Image (tube, rainbow, N blue to C red):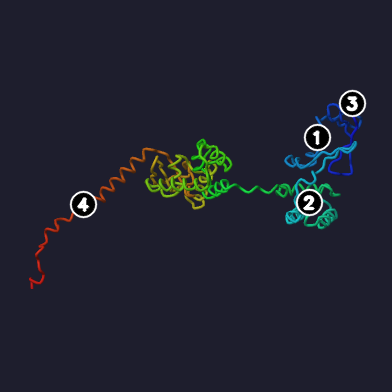
Amino acid sequence: MEERKLFNFNNEVDTFEVLVDSETGVVTVPGENGEPIATYDSMQQFAEIYAQARDVKPEHLKNWVLVEQGDVYSFVLRAGTAGVAYQDVRETVNEVLTALEAENFAHPLQMAQFRNSVNAWTNDTDVMNALAVSTMPDIAREVYDRLAEAGAFNPPAPEPTPLEAFLQDMKERHGNLIFFAWRAGMAAESWVSATVDEVKAALEAGPVPVTPEGLYADYQQTITSIQNNNIGVNTDEEALLVLTQSNVDTAEDSEKAKSQISVSARLAGRNKVNLPVYTVGRRNIKKTNELRTLDELPEVHFVNRIPTVVVFDPSVDEVLEAEAAEAAAVTLAPVNNYGYGETDYDEDYDEDEEF
């Protein structure tokens, strides 16, 4: 059996009639001649689709509520959910109103009237409640949407745990969490792009409890050991190249590096660039340079913030270590004194006796 109901949007004066099946909840919208022109699974579905047609963004629908009073259904801003005091968003509200006035969103007299109503709010006025009961719903809804986009109604972010704060700090220092993603045993393809939450979850899922102090000590010890005991490894990023056998920037960063080289060269009127080349072994890094034309630029990656060609080749280790051993042998070889040994001097020589 269908029952006639009235639908109201956001406390507007106008209402219109819909038919609601008392058993199934299906909503039918009748046309001028009474013939159905659309059906909806429920009043909630109808209200949400209607709200979207009235420019309510889908992500904001959670802040609206369907209220039934007798034969009238009203879809209105959910009152009291935000708990945002006017004093906390006063500046943002003023920016929104100023923008709407500049855009001529509504008649200047209406905008002035709305601003006057806002000026009457106290510091403790709940902004969402005040907008929900506004007598100018079109302006109130637009103000609400823009405040929501600005994050005014978002709950304050919870304080990060010590582990979250540590990982976020390390990410900001190094641009990524590749060391800790590697340490946590995450898949290699996810190391560079891993988020704080992903790395935290992987670390906490391990068999050994982790602490920021322990992780940082592990990081420092591992990186320092690689720098001290290997050839051509001088910075944290270079140590991470050796450790992970992986580039330490994202594919997007790589494209950005290549673009920077091309643009800079063209601005300088050059069609060739001298690129640093890192040949990364399992232990060591060989550093050279190559002159390349812009038309044949290879893949480059940021290393120490410099666009660099990175090649992984374990055979370079033996070459570098052989060169280092040869250089050390030359340094330690006895110096040829060309016959002027200590035995050439008369130990009994007395300078005074000569005169």
Q: CA distance from mark 2 to mark 3?
A: 42 Å
Looking at marks 2 and 3 on the same chain, the residue that comes earlier in the sequence is marked by: 3
Q: Quadrant of the C terminus?
A: bottom left
- Which residue matches tag 3? 1
Label 4 neighbour load within 10 Å: few <14, some 14-19, many 20+: few
The kind of secondary structure element at disc 2 is: loop
Going by the numbered disc 3, the residue's amino acid type is: Met
Looking at marks 3 and 4 on the same chain, the residue that comes earlier in the sequence is marked by: 3
Confirm or deny contact between disc 2 and disc 4 (CB under 8 A). no
Dot in front, 1 or 2: 2
Q: Quick one: which residue is furthest to the bottom in this view? A: 355
Q: Quick one: which residue is furthest to the right in this view? A: 33
Confirm or deny contact between disc 4 and disc 1 (CB under 8 A). no
Q: Is residue 141 left or right of residue 297?
A: right
- Which residue matches tag 2? 126
Going by the numbered disc 4, the residue's amino acid type is: Pro
Going by the numbered disc 2, the residue's amino acid type is: Asp
Looking at marks 1 and 2 on the same chain, the residue that comes earlier in the sequence is marked by: 1
- Which residue matches tag 4? 334
Q: CA distance from mark 1 to mark 2?
A: 26 Å
Looking at marks 2 and 4 on the same chain, the residue that comes earlier in the sequence is marked by: 2
Looking at marks 4 and 1 on the same chain, the residue that comes earlier in the sequence is marked by: 1
Q: CA distance from mark 3 to mark 4?
A: 110 Å
Residue 285 x %, y %:
39, 44
- Which residue matches tag 1? 44
